[in-house]
Amino acid sequence: MSKIKYKFNTKSLTYEKVTVPIRKRVWQVLSYLATGLVFATITIILALNYLDSPKEKQLKRENEVISLQYELLNNRLEEVAEVLDDIQERDNNIYRTIFEAEPIPASIRKAGFGGVDRYKALQGYNNSDLMVETSKRLDRVSKQLYIQSKSFDEVVKLVKGKTQLLAAIPAIQPISNEDLRHQPSGFGWRTHPIYKTPEFHPGMDFSAPQGTEIRATGDATVERADAAAQGYGNHVVLNHGYGYKTLYGHMLKFVVRPGQKVKRGQLIGFVGSTGLSTAPHVHYEVMKGGEKMNPINYYYNDLTPEQYQKLIELSEQSSQSFD
C-alpha cells in the first residue's frame, strides 16, 4: 500500500493531500528502470572484459600448458635436427664416398615445401606463430629423414656384392690402441720436428715402442717394400685396389715382399725410427685415386664411437709430427 503524502498550504494554513499524476508516476518508474539498466549494462561489460569466468580461467591454464609443450617440442626438434645434420654429413663424406656414390646435394636435402599454404589452418590463434614454426620444423625434419632413409637404402644396395671392396678398404689402425705410447699426430699442417717449420703432414703418426707389430689395414697386394723413398726409411706401400693405397713408414724392418698378397690385420713389419724420424713410430697414409686422404675417416672397423671421437680429439690437439 503506497504512502499518502501531504503538503502544508501556507495560505490556508492547512494540510492538503498530494496527488501525483499517472503520467509522472510512469515517468519516474521508467527513469528508475533506465538507470538500473545502464548500471547493469556497465557492470556486465566490465565483468566480461576484466573478470574471467571459471571456464575461461581453465582454458587459459590449458593454453599455457600447450604453449610450454610446443616450446619443449621445438627444443627437441632442434636436437633431432643437429643429430640429423651429423648423419647427413657422414653419409655424404664417408659412406657414399667409400662406395663411390655421388653425395646428395644440400639443395635436395634442405629443400622446402612448395604449393599452397600448408599452415593456413593454424593461423588466427593466440599461439599461431609457435604452432606454425613447430609444424615447419617437423615437416623439414620428416622430409630430411625420408631422403636420408632412401640414401641408406642406396648404400645398402651398393654394399651387396662388394664384399671384396669392403675387405680391401683400409678400415683399421695399423697399430692397436693398447700399443700406442703417445697421442697420434694428425693429418694437416704441423710443425716439422727437425726443421721447426710449418709443413703439411699427409698422414698420421702412431708412436709405439720399437718392435711393435704393424699390420695391414685392409686386403691388398704389396706394391713396394724398401728404403728407397726419401725420408720414409724402411717403408711398405700396399695397393688395395679400387683406387686405395696405404703407406707405412719408418719401420724397423718389414716382413713382406713386393707382389705378395696380404689380408687385413696381417703382420707386415715392426715399428722403428728409420729415415727422417725423431722417435719410434709408424707414419701412416691413406691414398684414394692418387689423392692423400685423412686416415681418421677410415678407422670404423675396430673402434667404438667413443674411441673414434677420442682419437679425433687427440689427433687435432697435436701440433708437431714425428717426421
Image: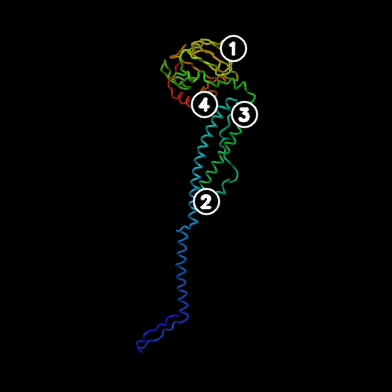
What secondary structure is marked by label 4?
Answer: loop
Earlier-in-chain disc, 2 versus 4: 2
| Crowdedness near tag 2: few (<14), some (14–19) or many (≥20) residues, C-alpha within 10 Å | few
Residue 98 in which image quadrant: top right
Q: Amino acid at mark 1?
A: Gln
Image quadrant where one finds the C terminus:
top left
Q: Which of labels 4 and 3 is toward the front?
A: 4
Q: Which of labels 2 and 4 is toward the front?
A: 4
Marks 3 and 2, how far apart in space? 46 Å
Does 123 appear above or below 161? below
Marks 2 and 4, how far apart in space? 49 Å
Q: Position of residue 188 (x, y in %)?
A: 47, 22
What secondary structure is marked by label 3?
Answer: helix
Earlier-in-chain disc, 2 versus 1: 2
Q: Is residue 138 left or right of residue 52?
A: right
Labels in figure, total: 4
What secondary structure is marked by label 1?
Answer: loop
Earlier-in-chain disc, 3 versus 1: 3
Q: Amino acid at mark 2?
A: Tyr
Tag 2–tag 4 contact (CB < 8 Å): no
Image quadrant where one finds the N terminus:
bottom left
Q: Which mark is residue 156?
A: 3
Outermost residue on the right side: it is 161
| Crowdedness near tag 4: few (<14), some (14–19) or many (≥20) residues, C-alpha within 10 Å | few
Q: Nearer the viewer, residue 28 or 290?
A: 28
Does 141 appear above or below 183? below
The residue that label 2 is drawn on is 125
Q: Which mark is residue 260?
A: 1
